[in-house]
Image: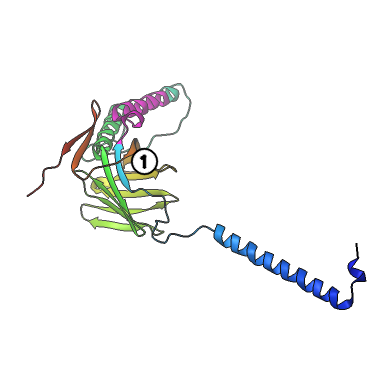
Amino acid sequence: MTSPRNFPSSARIALIAALQLCLVSASFGQNDRNEDDLPVLDFDAPIRMDFSGSWEKDFGRSDTWEDELNRQLRIRQEQAALQRAGINTGVAPRASLGNISLNSGRSRSASNMFELARLAEYISRQNILEITQDREHVRIERRGEAPLICSLEWGPMSTFSSPHGTEICGWDEQQLVFQITLPDDVSIQHRFTVASDGNELRMVTSVSSNGSTPFNLISAFNRFEAADDLNCIVTVSRGRVCSQVTPLD
């Protein structure tokens, strides 16, 4: 085989030019393939986790206020027993709710926790949530309650303020948080999280008063396909129950 060194000068120049042309063509071909492999950005899609959809409560994975109340009371009883034994567990913060004064005493403390538990159960009583979301806002519709609306932008957002209370919302990484303050220093927080597969929603409702330890209640929801002509509710005994929507005309 003839070595390139034995080629005439003009032939060597032509050979080198041909090799360079092949390398350039291969380089452009590789760039074209890389550009084709790049993901295409959808500017109509939300930049955060998608909370939109119809959600029904999963009672099997949700807390009941009675069980959670008993659990927290049991913890307090254990702490009281340790304190009587001379083991310091820290002093629980004093709290009040409405007209209930809770300065000291185990019975009053239990009464306060009972009131917080019932309030948490009442404000998280919805069994179905309807959530819409675009690139600017997320809106959570709850039957019998005002909707929860928040921007998708960074930073806290004031959504309501009056003598009857205030509401702000914001994002803790991918968690959506609503903080509501009512008269008598009652604080309510809703924290929403959606699973990575988009099929499960978790709402943690926390209620406290005067800086007390919050009472937390977890509500779990599953996504379902809602029909426009059906009105559905979720019950503990019968699950989802739907009825035909009667047209107004």
Badge 1 marks a residue whose secondary structure is strand
Up/down of 225 relative to 16, above or below: above
Residue 192: image location, x then y, percent: 36, 44
Up/down of 161 relative to 196, above or below: below
Three-letter code, disc 1: Leu
Mark 1: few/some/many CA within 10 Å (<14, 14-19, 20+): many
Q: Which residues are magenta?
A: 57-80
Looking at the image, residue 236 sits to the left or right of residue 199; the answer is left
Q: Residue furthest front?
A: 1
Residue 15: image location, x then y, percent: 81, 71
Looking at the image, residue 196 sits to the left or right of residue 58; the answer is right
- For the residue pair 117 and 14, the one nearer the viewer reads as 14
Which residue carries the number 1 mark? 201
Confirm whether the magenta stretch covers residue 39: no
- For the residue pair 49 and 176, the one nearer the viewer reads as 49
Confirm whether the magenta stretch covers residue 78: yes
Tell me where residue 94 sits by quadrant: top left
Residue 92: image location, x then y, percent: 39, 34
